[in-house]
Image: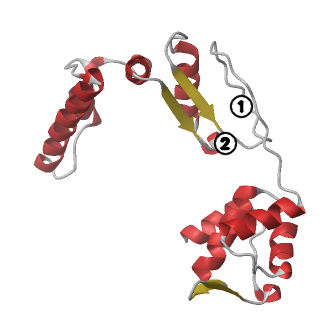
Amino acid sequence: FGKINAKKEEFREKINRISTLNKKNDGVHNITEILKIWFNDSNIDSYNEETLKKIMFKYIKDLFSEIANDSPTIIIIEDVQWADSASLSIIDYLLLETNTDSPLFFVITQRPDYNHEFQSKIKSDRFELKSFDKDEANEFIKNYLSSELVPDDFIDAIYNKTQGNPLYIEEIIKSFIDKGYIFEEEGKWHFGKTQKIEIPSTIVETIQARID
C-alpha cells in the first residue's frame, strides 16, 4: 500500500494548496490556477481545450491503474442514464485505454431502455435485472420495512404504480415516510389510508418531490 499512501499524501498536499489559494482570493480565482497546482504544470493555461481534456483523462486513467496495480480494484458507476456527455466520455476513455492486464473491474448500471453502447477492449458481460412480480414486490416491501404486518392495499397501490421497479418502490416508501403517510412507533409501522395518498407518476417525480 506504499504507492497508495504516497498518492494520498500527494492529494492532501495539493488540496491544502488549493484551499489556501481559495482563502486568499475569497473564493474567486481562475480555474487554471487550480489546474496548475493539481497537475503540477505551470504551462497549463496555454493549452487548448482538447489538450487539457486529454491531460485530465490520462491523469484519471493513470490514477485508477496505479491503485489497481497495487491492489485489485472494483469501480462502480451507477445510473449512467443520468450522466452528462463529459462524464460518458471519461467512462468510455477508461474502458478503452485502461491496461487490460490491470486487475481493474468496472460495474456500470443503467436503465434497460438506455442505449449508450460503451466501447471496451475489456471483456464485458451484460446482465438485465427484471422488475419484481407481485409476490417479489410483496416480499421486498416487507423486508424493506422489516415487518410482516404490511396491509395488502398498501402493497397493491405501490405495485400497481411501479409495476415492480425496485428503485421506484424504494423511493416511494421513502417519500411516504418523509411525508408521514407511514410512520414507526414503538417498533410497529402505522399506515394511512392508501386512497388518500398521492403517488407520483414517475420515479423522477418521486425523487424530485423528496428533494423539494
Q: Sequence-wise, which precedes: disc 2 or disc 1?
A: 2
Question: In this rendering, would 201 be left or right of 75?
Answer: right
Specify the amino acid type for callout 2: Gln
Task: Report x, y in % for residue 134.
Answer: 89, 63
Identify the mark at residue 116; answer none if there is no mark: 1
Q: Quadrant of the C terminus?
A: bottom right
Of residues 27 and 162, the one nearer the viewer is: 162
Q: Where is 5 relative to 204, above or below? A: above
Question: In this rendering, would 131 be left or right of 179?
Answer: right
Task: Report x, y in % for residue 106.
Answer: 58, 28
Which residue is depicted at the point 71% across and 31% down?
116
Q: Quadrant of the N terminus?
A: top left
Q: Where is 127 relative to 143, above or below? A: above
Which residue is depicted at the point 22% across and 19% down?
41
Does dot 2 land on a helix, a strand or a loop? Answer: helix
Task: Report x, y in % for residue 97.
Answer: 53, 13
Identify the mark at residue 81; answer none if there is no mark: 2
Find out whether the residues at labels 2 and 1 contact each other: C-beta distance under 8 Å.
yes
Task: Report x, y in % for residue 125.
Answer: 73, 25
